[in-house]
């Protein structure tokens, strides 16, 4: 029996700078040179910082952490486009974006060493603490977005980051639903890095794209080459403008790859092949951005060397400051979980302090 088609849906894909650094002239955005260089510098800083943290972790100088190596364009570029009034509600794999928003490297190091002080974000940075609960932050983002709308805060948007695995969680679907219904100013950025710990993308969802998950909620979705800084720039700029101008939410699927382990507690060689990883190496967002800067004739080897050395010095300084700091207060763990502290938490805190005092007295 012939059926009437009521709607047709489609998903667009955006790539502007291909793997060889060749730019699609028709789609190339006009970005001021200093902004291009600044974006590249942030991406390099995120990469160098991750590499240093990997070493620190292996030396037992910080705790567990999840590197974002290979995913820098997907989160650093949108963060560079955010303004002071915007909010960032992230997961655990976008340390670069948090630094761009004003978190210090010292604070990131506190966080990855288990100190609560690392969750205390600088005033005015508008960053919510890292969400370890996969996908839960998307609901927080819609809450913040709805609040901005309710309070009539102009020119402000919320950017929430999450992984491909998070899009199989109920939280994500509830968040998308309410973002759509309330037309909340939220930019959902899925860093589709192909893996959720040891689970490959094809084993956790049958959806051909992640972007199409927006269609069910009437949230415009776009699939973007997440290793292409120019495509991420264009997609994030459009989504942020839509949100800030009352046009509601957007879902951006940034197609990228997790080049390293899930976290330092895991060994990816147990579940994926070197061949797969090798295949993604030429798609590296940093190589691509560097090629673009060279093509624009605004970058050379001497500048690269100088910038890398500056960045490494900044990281050295942060590590030194972090390791010199003492007097962390583990009892503040009880202070910031809720706006108002429940009496049971007060009791637990008192018990914890008494226990700590006993341990100190016993040496
Ligand atoms: C609700 C919940 N379930 C399970 C976990 C354990 N866990 C931590 S990260 C992760 C995979 C997340 O994958 P994805 O969303 O793709 O993000 P990625 O780690 O790849 O950045 C899982 C299952 C968790 N933290 N929270
Ligand atoms: Mg993932």
Image (tube, rainbow, N blue to C red):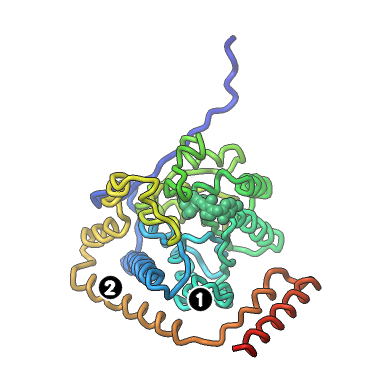
Residue that mark 1 sits on: 110
Q: Residue furthest right?
A: 343
Dot in front, 2 or 1:
1
Up/down of 174 relative to 244, above or below? above
Please report contact status of discs 2 and 1: CB closer than 8 Å, yes or no. Answer: no
Q: Which mark is residue 308?
A: 2
At x 38% / y 50%, what residue is drawn?
Answer: 257
| Residue 227 visible, this orientation | yes
Q: Is mark 1 within 8 Å of ligand 1?
A: no
CA–CA distance between discs 2 and 1? 24 Å
Q: Residues within 10 Å of mark 1 (few under 14, many from 20)?
A: many
Quarter of the view holding residue 244: bottom right
Q: Position of residue 301 (x, y in %)?
A: 18, 69
From this viewpoint, is residue 241 visible?
Answer: no
Residue at the image position 67 percent from the left and 48 percent from the top: 178
Q: Earlier in the sequence, mark 2 or mark 1?
A: 1
In this rendering, position of residue 319 left or right of residue 90: left
Q: Position of residue 127 (x, y in %)?
A: 56, 68
């Amino acid at each position: 029996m012939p059926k009437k088609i009521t709607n047709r849906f489609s998903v667009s894909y955006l790539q502007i700078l291909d793997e060889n650094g060749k730019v699609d002239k028709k789609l190339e955005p006009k970005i001021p040179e200093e902004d291009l260089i600044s974006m590249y510098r942030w991406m390099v800083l995120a990469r160098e910082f991750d590499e240093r943290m990997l070493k620190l972790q292996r030396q037992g100088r910080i705790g567990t952490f999840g590197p974002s190596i290979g995913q820098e364009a997907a989160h650093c570029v949108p963060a560079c486009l955010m303004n002071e009034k915007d909010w960032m509600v992230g997961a655990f794999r976008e340390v670069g974006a948090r630094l761009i928003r004003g978190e210090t490297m010292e604070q990131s190091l506190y966080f990855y060493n288990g100190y609560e002080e690392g969750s205390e974000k600088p005033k005015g940075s508008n960053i919510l603490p890292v969400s370890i609960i996969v996908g839960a932050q998307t609901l927080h983002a819609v809450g913040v977005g709805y609040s901005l709308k309710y309070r009539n805060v102009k020119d402000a948007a919320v950017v929430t980051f999450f992984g491909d695995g998070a899009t199989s969680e109920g939280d994500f679907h509830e968040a998308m639903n309410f973002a759509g219904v309330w037309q909340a100013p939220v930019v959902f950025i899925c860093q589709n890095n192909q893996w959720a710990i040891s689970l490959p993308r094809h084993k956790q969802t049958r959806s051909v794209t992640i972007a199409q998950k927006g269609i069910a909620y009437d949230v415009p979705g776009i699939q973007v080459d997440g290793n292409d800084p120019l495509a991420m720039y264009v997609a994030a700029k459009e989504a942020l403008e839509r949100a800030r101008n009352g046009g509601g939410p957007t879902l951006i699927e940034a197609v990228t790859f997790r080049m390293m382990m899930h976290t330092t507690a895991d060994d990816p060689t147990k579940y994926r092949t070197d061949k797969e990883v090798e295949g993604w190496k030429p798609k590296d967002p940093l190589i691509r951005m560097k090629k673009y800067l060279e093509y624009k004739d605004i970058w050379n080897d001497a500048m690269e060397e100088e910038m890398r050395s500056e960045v490494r010095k900044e990281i050295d300084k942060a590590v030194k400051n972090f390791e010199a700091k003492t007097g962390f207060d583990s009892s503040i763990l009880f202070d910031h979980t809720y706006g108002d502290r429940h009496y049971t938490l007060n009791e637990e805190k008192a018990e914890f302090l008494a226990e700590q005092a006993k341990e100190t007295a016993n040496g």
